[in-house]
């Protein structure tokens, strides 16, 4: 799939094209291709960034926006977990898919605790360890 150059700055004309893609799917009921979905997602979020900042973002800035949104969602997900829950091997296997970000930090800390103690830690144990290490979660 062809991707936009990270340095490319989105323009008002691009947003007009993105609106046509959005309308194609939702007004006309025509499914977008993977390429069109990517362009539509970039352009819709670029328009949101423009509304917030007054400046048209680069594609790289849209990617950064996505990363911040994903990290915020991970923080909310972790915050919703109960302190007394004990991790299982299945949790480690399932959550190990992340390669960076808050979830990666949290699961890595949990795995390190298991390596140290030999027992699966609780969510509270991981939070306490991260607080000691001053890692934000």
Image: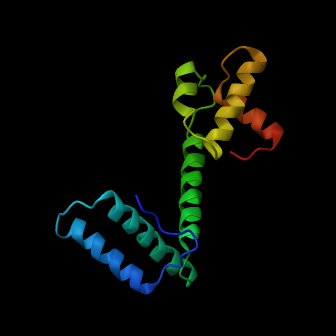
Q: Is residue 64 left or right of residue 31?
A: right
Q: How is the image coloured?
A: rainbow
Relative height, residue 100 to residue 22 (above, below): above
Residue at (35, 75) in percent of width and height: 18
User: Which residue is the extreme one toward the top?
Assistant: 118
Q: Is residue 8 left or right of residue 130?
A: left
Q: How many marks?
A: 0
Residue 7's spot in the image, x, y percent?
Answer: 58, 73
Residue at (68, 28) in percent of width and height: 110
Residue 81's spot in the image, x, y percent?
Answer: 57, 36
Relative height, residue 62 to residue 95 (above, below): below
Camera-side residue of 119 and 19:
19
Relative height, residue 29 to residue 121 (above, below): below
Q: Quadrant of residue 52?
A: bottom right
Q: Quadrant of residue 100?
A: top right
Residue at (54, 76) in percent of width and height: 8
User: Which residue is the extreme one toward the front?
Assistant: 2
Q: Is residue 4 left or right of residue 127?
A: left
Residue at (54, 36) in percent of width and height: 97
Residue 94's spot in the image, x, y percent?
Answer: 51, 29
Q: Quadrant of residue 124?
A: top right
Camera-side residue of 134 and 15:
15
**Quarter of the picture holding the N terminus:** bottom left
Relative height, residue 126 to residue 105 (above, below): above
Residue 112's spot in the image, x, y percent?
Answer: 74, 26
**Quarter of the picture holding the C terminus:** top right
Q: Is residue 16 left or right of residue 24?
A: right
């Amino acid at each position: 799939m062809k991707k936009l150059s990270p340095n490319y700055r989105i323009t008002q004309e691009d947003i007009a094209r993105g609106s046509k893609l959005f309308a194609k799917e939702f007004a006309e009921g025509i499914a977008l291709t993977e390429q069109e979905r990517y362009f539509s997602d970039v352009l819709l979020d670029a328009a949101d960034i423009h509304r917030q900042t007054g400046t048209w973002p680069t594609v790289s800035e849209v990617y950064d926006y996505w990363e911040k949104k994903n990290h915020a969602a991970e923080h909310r997900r972790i915050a919703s977990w109960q302190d007394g829950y004990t991790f299982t091997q299945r949790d480690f296997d399932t959550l190990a898919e992340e390669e960076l970000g808050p979830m990666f930090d949290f699961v890595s800390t949990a795995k390190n605790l298991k390596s140290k103690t030999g027992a699966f830690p609780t969510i509270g144990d991981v939070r306490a360890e991260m607080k000691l290490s001053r890692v934000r979660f």
